[in-house]
Image: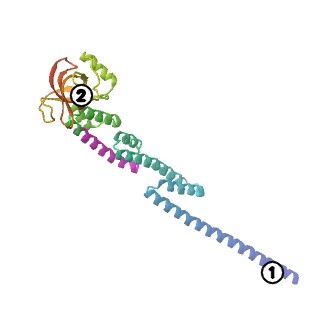
């Protein structure tokens, strides 16, 4: 009997020990689960903070850890969004650098790669594009006022090629080039050749040395160029020359800011001629 009692007590102690061990294991698992959940929440909070601060690379690293720990699809989606934003952020920053160096067309090309309307950078890009258009229009107007319509036309055409369409830019371009708004670069060689054929005049490039200009017949390159009765920006406008017309220079005058050319202007379209002053900026 005594042996049976001892065996029974031993068995009870063993069961109690096993139950204790199981309890400890369960407690440890619960505690571990709680700690893991707490750690997960901390990582989520950090990732969200990095997203707000536009530190997408750091957010991507955290979401990768969360995916590895949990396999949760939600974190995969958040990681993909962070990766897209990182790419868009790079394009935006490149565009902003181009704007600072006045490389507007390059900036537009970079911005055009951000086309998700729900992206935080899409709105930023639209604001910058408006500013670029305003800058280009203002610069074009300055060139027009300085009788450099050739450069103004070139700027506006380059802008339209980059953006496709702009009512304000097209309107200004029309005021320079007339109803047939040029959709090609005014410097396009084929267009130049066609104009030269119409004039039936042999033209040449304007020499760099202005003392050699007299006697030269050169092509007018501006979309529209003012012809004046005097060698001054305040001289009365007596006519308009267009790209492809030609001038045979008989006199020049340097006013200190620009060189004016006087001579016979021949229309590429009609062959008619007139004599007037024209800014050399329209010939280069």
Classified by dominant secondary structure, the portion drawn in magenta counts as helix
How is colour applied across the structure in the image?
rainbow
Q: Which residues are magenta?
A: 118-141
Is residue 212 or residue 86 the one in the foreground?
212
Of circles 1 and 2, the one toward us is: 2
Residue 211, which numbered label?
A: 2
- Precedes in sequence: disc 1 or disc 2: 1
Instruction: Give residue 53's quadrant in the image.
Output: bottom left
Q: Name the residue located 28 percent from the left edge and 35 percent from the top edge.
A: 156
Residue 176, how many percent across, how many down?
A: 22, 32
Judged from the image, the secondary structure of the residue bearing numbered disc 2 is: helix
Residue 179, how many percent across, how many down?
A: 22, 28
User: Magenta stretch: residue 134 in it?
Assistant: yes
Q: Is residue 7 left or right of residue 18?
A: right
Residue 187, how many percent across, how many down?
A: 31, 28
Residue 209, which numbered label?
A: none
Q: Is residue 275 visible?
A: yes
Residue 161, how many percent across, how many down?
A: 34, 34
Q: Considering the image in quadrants, where does the C terminus appear? A: top left
Crowd around label 1: few <14 · some 14–19 · many ≥20 (10 Å): few
For marks 1 and 2, give the CA distance.
124 Å
Is residue 247 or residue 238 the one in the foreground?
247
Is residue 235 or residue 91 the one in the foreground?
235
Vertical side of 107 occupied by 74: above or below: below
Crowd around label 2: few <14 · some 14–19 · many ≥20 (10 Å): few
Vertical side of 162 occupied by 58: above or below: below
| Circles 1 and 2: CB atoms closer than 8 Å | no
Residue under numbered circle 1: 9
Is residue 211 or residue 74 the one in the foreground?
211
């Amino acid at each position: 009997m005594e042996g049976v009692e001892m065996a029974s007590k031993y068995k009870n102690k063993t069961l109690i020990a096993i139950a204790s061990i199981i309890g400890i294991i369960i407690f440890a698992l619960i505690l571990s689960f709680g700690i893991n959940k707490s750690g997960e929440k901390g990582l989520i909070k950090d990732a969200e903070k990095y997203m707000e601060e536009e530190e997408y690379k750091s957010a991507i690293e955290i979401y990768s850890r969360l995916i590895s720990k949990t396999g949760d699809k939600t974190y995969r989606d958040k990681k993909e969004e962070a990766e897209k934003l990182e790419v868009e952020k790079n394009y935006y920053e490149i565009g902003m650098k181009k704007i600072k160096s006045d490389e507007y067309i390059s900036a537009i090309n970079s911005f055009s790669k951000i086309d998700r309307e729900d992206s935080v950078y899409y709105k930023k890009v639209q604001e910058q594009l408006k500013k670029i258009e305003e800058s280009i229009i203002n610069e074009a107007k300055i060139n027009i006022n300085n009788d450099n319509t050739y450069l103004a036309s070139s700027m506006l055409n380059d802008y339209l090629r980059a953006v496709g369409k702009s009512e304000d830019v097209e309107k200004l371009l029309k005021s320079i080039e007339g109803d047939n708004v040029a959709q090609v670069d005014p410097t396009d060689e084929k267009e130049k050749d066609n104009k030269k054929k119409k004039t039936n005049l042999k033209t040449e490039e304007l020499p760099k040395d202005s003392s050699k200009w007299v006697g030269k017949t050169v092509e007018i390159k501006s979309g529209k160029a003012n012809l004046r009765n005097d060698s001054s920006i305040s001289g009365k406008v007596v006519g308009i020359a267009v790209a492809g017309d030609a001038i045979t220079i008989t006199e020049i005058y340097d006013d200190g800011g620009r060189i004016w050319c006087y001579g016979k202007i021949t229309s590429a379209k009609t062959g008619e001629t007139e004599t007037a002053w024209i800014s050399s900026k329209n010939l280069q």
